[in-house]
Image (cartoon, rainbow, N blue to C red):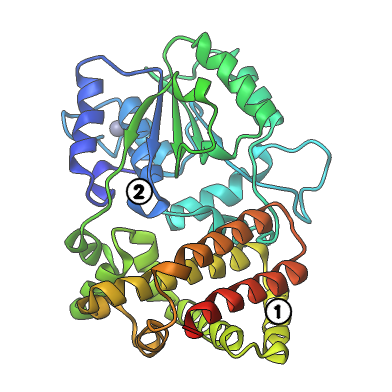
Amino acid sequence: MLFSQVVGQSELKKKLRDSVTNGRVAHAQMLVGPAGSGPLPLALAYAQYLACKARTDSESCGTCGSCLRYAKLEHPDLQLIFPKNKTQKVDSKNFSSKDFLAEWRAAVLSNPYLNLNSWLKGLGIENKQGFINVDDSREVLQNLSYKAYDSEYRVVLIWLAEYMNPASANKILKILEEPPERTVFLLVAESTENMLQTILSRVQIHRLGRLNETEIAAALPGEDPVRSKQLAHLADGDLNLAKQLLEDEASVTQSIHFFIQWMRACFAVNVEAIQDLMEEFQSLGREQQKAILQQSGSILRKVLMYRTLPETKEKLLQEELEFVHKFSRFITMNNAAGMLQELDDAHYHIERNANARILFTDLSFKLSDLVLSEAMK
Ligand SMILES: [Zn+2]
């Protein structure tokens, strides 16, 4: 990956390049931002730059032996660690990122802005949680005991470091405390929220800003510049979301439809309709269930925005507008916080394998109470 292939982030690119030019490359760094802002492609561009034999002040050469290997993510001095889980193909007791390397390379080469959901879906395990395990950390240790192949710096790239389980994180921490020479740990994370404080204190953190609309629109493959601009606007700084919207407008519309139907059923306390929706919800993969809950929260926020700033309706999709307008009477500052909290809690429990049927039914009645509490006034 070249820096020029990474959308936007020009300030951070410069900071990373300068660290190399000035010989001040920190041994452990972490790029933090949503997948759609590009922490992974930026980490890959930086790693390639570190290893390039003929880099300039601004870019890797793209043609040396090292760059050619990096272009295929096959450099012997690049170790790749990422979340995964058992699949039909890999289901032994011990497994590590190495067992999934071919699939990961293919997925990242086809979309360097890959997110966890798409990655797990590609493996056919979207119902499972992905994680980085202690076998991964063991392999990192083992690898570091060998000499570097031929690079000035070798790189251990940990994608979505927040998914290291405790055993794995503690082992990595030990390595970070006594860093081997000429080795750079590049951690990529969407957020630092669930990470060990002791790890955070060992890494230099770079936060990625949201991309602006022009950067996103220019990076979209579509032929229609007006639509690209609209999608960039809707995606709110997230290239992944813009691409996803473009490729898969139908699925987003679907989760909006689901939420709208659901709220109508809750409002009418229509038990039969709630039951049908519960069946539908239960049949979805865990990641999709989480996506629906998230999408629901985002529509609720839009309703509140619409109440306070009616001009924000320009940001709404056609499907949302009617609903938002109608429900803005029943969703107010009084009940919205409670509803958002319930959705958040449900998301938390789904992530921890709660029973989807019970959870959805319970949540529906709670939301129903909250909506009706305002409607009765
Ligand atoms: Zn090169």
Given residues 377 and 75, the one toward you in this image is 377
| Lateral position of residue 256 relative to residue 21, left or right | right
- Total number of numbered labels? 2
Residue to which mark 2 is pinned = 38
Tell me what residue is drawn at x 55 percent, y 88 percent: 264
Is 314 situated above or below 42?
below
**Which image quarter: residue 301?**
bottom left
Tell me the CA gap for discs 1 and 2: 35 Å
Crowd band around label 1 with a 10 angstrom C-alpha radius: few (<14), some (14–19), many (20+): some
Question: Which residue is the site of mark 1?
Answer: 278
Q: Which mark is residue 169?
A: none
Judging from the image, what secondary structure is the residue with disc 1 in?
A: helix
Q: Is residue 173 above or below residue 127?
A: above
Tell me the residue at 69%/37% (across/down).
96
Q: Point out the tag, 1 or 2, that comes first from the N-terminus.
A: 2
Relative vertical location of residue 32 with respect to residue 51 in this rendering, above or below: below
Q: State if disc 2 and disc 1 touch (CB < 8 Å).
A: no
Front disc: 1 or 2: 1
Q: Amino acid at mark 1?
A: Met
**Residue beneath the point at 35% across and 18% down:** 26
Looking at the rendering, in which quadrant would you find the N terminus?
top left
- At which x and y percent is residue 85? 70, 47
Indicate the secondary structure of the residue bearing disc 2: loop
Mark 2 packing: few (<14 Cα in 10 Å), some, or many (20+)? Answer: many
Ligand 1 is located in which of the four quadrants? top left
Q: Amino acid at mark 2?
A: Gly
Q: Residue furthest right?
A: 93
Image position of 53 with respect to 342: above or below: above
Measured from the top left, where is residue 57 in percent x and y? Answer: 16, 28
Question: Residue 349: x percent and y percent?
Answer: 67, 55
